Image (cartoon, rainbow, N blue to C red):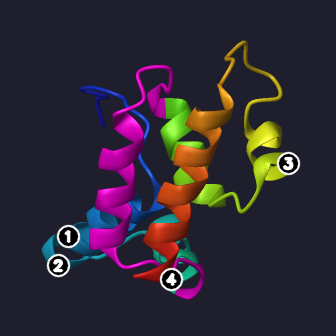
């Protein structure tokens, strides 16, 4: 198998890819395990995830890796958010942090 391109995706997108692949052909062992895990532990509806990603993309400081990390972790407070950016040289203003947390809260409620 050749790699055509590579990009970061959320586990929700991975779940969608695996479901599509499952319809086309039988999944291998690792793919079955990954899909099983994603079915058990990812509870947000896909439309909420898409809305959250779109909302996070409005902040120009956030890269794809940050957006994926936020969607995966769904931080509930500034401490959680600080953990996500601990190894990065990104500085978020208080209003940007609050916007991220508000977007996560809205996506979790729907």
Observer-side mark, 1 or 3, equals 3
Q: Residue at label 3? A: 79
Neighbourhood count class around disc 4 (C-alpha, 10 Å): few under 14, some 14–19, many 20 upward: few
Which residue has dot 2 on it? 23
Whichever of callouts 1 and 3 sits on the residue coming sooner in the sequence is: 1
Q: Quadrant of residue 66?
A: top right
Q: Residue at x 45, y 52 (%)?
A: 10
Counting residues from the start of the chain, the first of labels 2 and 3 encountered is 2
Q: Position of residue 102 (x, y in %)?
A: 54, 58
Asked whether residue 54 is drawn in magenta, I would say yes
Q: Residues within 10 Å of mark 3 (few under 14, many from 20)?
A: few
Can you tell which of label 2 and label 3 is closer to the viewer?
A: 3
Q: Which quadrant holds the C terminus? A: bottom left
Q: Magenta span covers which residues?
A: 40-64
> Residue visible at 20% across and 70% down?
20
Q: Is residue 53 above or below residue 2?
A: below
Q: Earlier in the sequence, mark 4 or mark 2?
A: 2
Q: Disc 4 vs disc 1: which is toward the camera?
A: 4
- Residue beneath disc 4: 43
Q: CA distance from mark 4 to mark 1?
A: 19 Å
Residue 20: mark: 1
Where residue 58 sits in the image (x, y, percent)? 34, 34
Secondary structure type for disc 2: helix
Q: In the drawing, does residue 79 fall left or right of residue 109?
A: right
Badge 3 marks a residue whose secondary structure is helix
Q: Main secondary structure of the magenta part?
A: helix
Whether tag 2 and tag 1 are in contact, CB under 8 A, the answer is yes
Query: Helix, strand, or loop for circle 4?
Result: loop
How far is mark 4 from mark 3, CA to CA?
A: 23 Å
Q: Locate residue 50: give its quadrant.
A: bottom left
Q: Give the residue drawn at x 85%, y 48%.
A: 79
CA gap, disc 2 and disc 3: 41 Å
């Amino acid at each position: 198998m050749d790699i055509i391109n590579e990009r970061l995706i959320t586990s929700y997108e991975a779940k969608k890819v695996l479901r599509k692949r499952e319809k086309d052909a039988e999944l291998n062992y690792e793919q079955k395990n990954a899909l099983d895990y994603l079915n058990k532990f990812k509870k947000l509806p896909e439309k909420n995830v898409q809305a959250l990603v779109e909302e996070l993309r409005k902040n120009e400081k956030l890269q794809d890796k940050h957006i994926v990390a936020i969607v995966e972790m769904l931080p509930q407070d500034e401490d959680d958010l600080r953990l996500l950016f601990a190894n990065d040289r990104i500085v978020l203003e208080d209003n940007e942090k609050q916007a991220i947390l508000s977007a996560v809260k809205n996506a979790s409620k729907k």
